[in-house]
Amino acid sequence: MSKDDDTTRAYHGDNPYSSVASERTDKERDLRRIYFALVACHPEGMTSDECEILLGIPHQTCSARFTDMKRYGWVEWCGTRKTRTGSPAGVWRVTKEEDDATES
């Protein structure tokens, strides 16, 4: 993956430590884990916070992968639920097109 694949670059402003952390992350593995958790366990959708709990993925990683999936058009917003801290969070589910593709 290139520097352009760093979803969080705008947040960390090319901080060298954050850039190294991004390069060391296995984004494809994390995308697969989250995507298939949505398909298999939560077809009605889930928040990033719920996914963090289910898969034991750190917040920064899970949130960035949800951002990637939104950017790729793999997930769509379907509601709001509260997080562990009581804050509202978007609920995301696999888009119909992506769901149909996984069934083929």
Image (cartoon, rainbow, N blue to C red):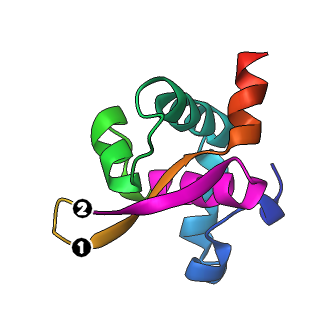
Q: In this view, does 42 lie above or below 79?
A: above
Q: What residue type is labelled 2?
A: Thr
x, y percent for residue 84 = 17, 59
User: What residue would you read off at disc 2?
Assistant: 83
- Secondary structure type for disc 2: loop
As drawn, the residue found furthest toward the left would be: 85
Give 66 or 29, whichever is nearer the viewer. 66
Q: Quadrant of the C terminus?
A: top right
Residue 98 lies, in percent from the top left, at 73, 37
Q: How many labels sit on residues? A: 2
Residue 66: in magenta span: yes
Q: Which of these two is toward me, 55 or 43?
A: 43
In this picture, residue 10 sits left or right of residue 17: right
Helix, strand or loop at disc 1? loop
| Magenta residues, start to end | 61-81
Marks 1 and 2 sit apart, C-alpha to C-alpha, by 5 Å
Q: Is 95 above or below relative to 48?
A: above
Q: Mark 1 points at which residue?
A: 87
Pointer 1 and pointer 2: residues touching (CB < 8 Å)?
yes
Is 88 inside the magenta-drawn segment?
no
Identify the residue shown where x is 67% and y is 65%: 7
Does 47 sit above or below residue 33? below
Does residue 26 appear left or right of residue 91 in this picture? right
Instruction: Tell me which amino acid carries mark 1.
Output: Ser
Other residues around mark 1 within 10 Å, as few (<14) / some (14–19) / many (≥20) = few
Q: Where is residue 22 in the image (x, y as percent from the top left)?
A: 61, 56
In this view, the residue in front, 25 or 58, is: 58
For residue 44, what is the image quadrant? top left
Q: Which residue is drawn at 16% across and 69% down?
A: 86
Residue 62's x, y, as percent? 46, 51
Res 33 visible: yes
